[in-house]
Amino acid sequence: FQPKRTVLIMFGHDEEVLGNGAEAGIALLKSRGISPVMALDEGFAIIDPSPLTGKPMAYIGVSEKGYLTLTLTALAEGGHSSTPPRDSAAVRLARAIVALDENQMPADFSKPPVSDLFRVSAPDLPFMQKMAFANLWLFAGSVDSAMADIPAGNAMIRTTTAPTMLAGSAKENVLAQRAMATVNFRVHPNNTVEDVIKHVKDVTSDIKGIEVTVSDGGISGSEASPVSPTDNKAYAVLASVAEAQGGGAAVAPGLVLGATDARYASAITDSVYRFAPSVLNPTDLSGFHGTNERLAVENMKRLSEGYAQIIVAMDSGD
């Protein structure tokens, strides 16, 4: 077999840490006027069992979340810890963090990929959940609450808020004049970076002495990637291969919660997908980037067959 279509394989030298290699590679292709019919990266697979349905389910990533880190700075008078005020910098910062935790970014089930994921999953759900997914206009609050109780489910439906780093006084008996928190947000496709910044400022606006700034360390902010179509040949081919390699597993579009190099490919094509034709269980997933990271031999076979099937299918017809 010799493909008629050109097949480009890109290996970024820093894929797991930065992605500068992929960004440079995509920029080179763009400068040459190359616009592929599809860009494919890792990101999702066939999950058995799916945490949503309890049955095997293949997820094809059609978008991935953006990234934003903000710094909350609380300012107040310092002093000695023997005579503390009721409204110190640390207390103000704590109030701001609690306010953000209690006022999460809103969920929206009306747009892809979440709406498509719910639609495809509904037939395999118990009756009550099926009814709720089919009538989100009535049960949106209940679905929101149920999904929010599961970290991965919560991340699928909204921009997440994660305070990660704290700093205050350098001594145990000295009140900080400045207390700081680093808060990381994974931006949902329904939101923009500016939406998140506005939300944080609104939520903390009535707390005295709070400043909100974009972090100047590392990655400061990037939008969620565009949502790729599910009504074209590229998605149909991936869905067919996923169903075959998954033994008839249902196939649904999904939102990748982390970052992949595929985010750069949106600059040269609107058909960007994240899927590896393998079957993974919870143990496999928990071992990624961990101790004794491994992949079953059977999955090596599935990956080899699956990628070959994708290349052959994309090469046929229009």
Image (cartoon, grey):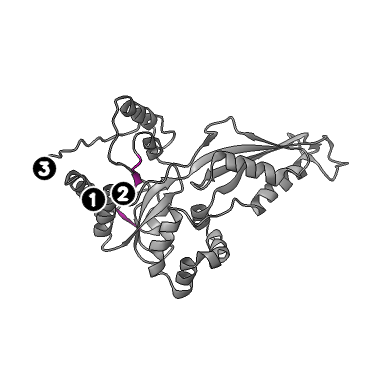
| Disc 2 residue type (three-letter) | Ala
Q: Which residue is mark 2?
A: 276
Q: Quadrant of residue 226?
A: top left
Q: Quadrant of the N terminus?
A: top left
Residue 254: numbered disc: none
Q: Position of residue 80 (x, y in %)?
A: 85, 37
Quadrant hosting residue 56: bottom left
Is 204 on the left-hand or right-hand side of 186? Answer: right
Q: Which mark is nearer the camera, 2 or 3?
A: 3
Q: Quadrant of the C terminus?
A: top left
Pointer 3 local density, CA inside 10 Å: few below 14, some 14–19, many at least 20? few
Q: Which is nearer the eye, 117 or 262?
A: 117
Q: Which residue is mark 1?
A: 306
Secondary structure of residue under mark 2: loop
Q: Is residue 131 visible?
A: yes
Magenta extent: 270-280
- Real-space CA distance between mark 3 and mark 1, rounded to the nearest whole angstrom: 15 Å
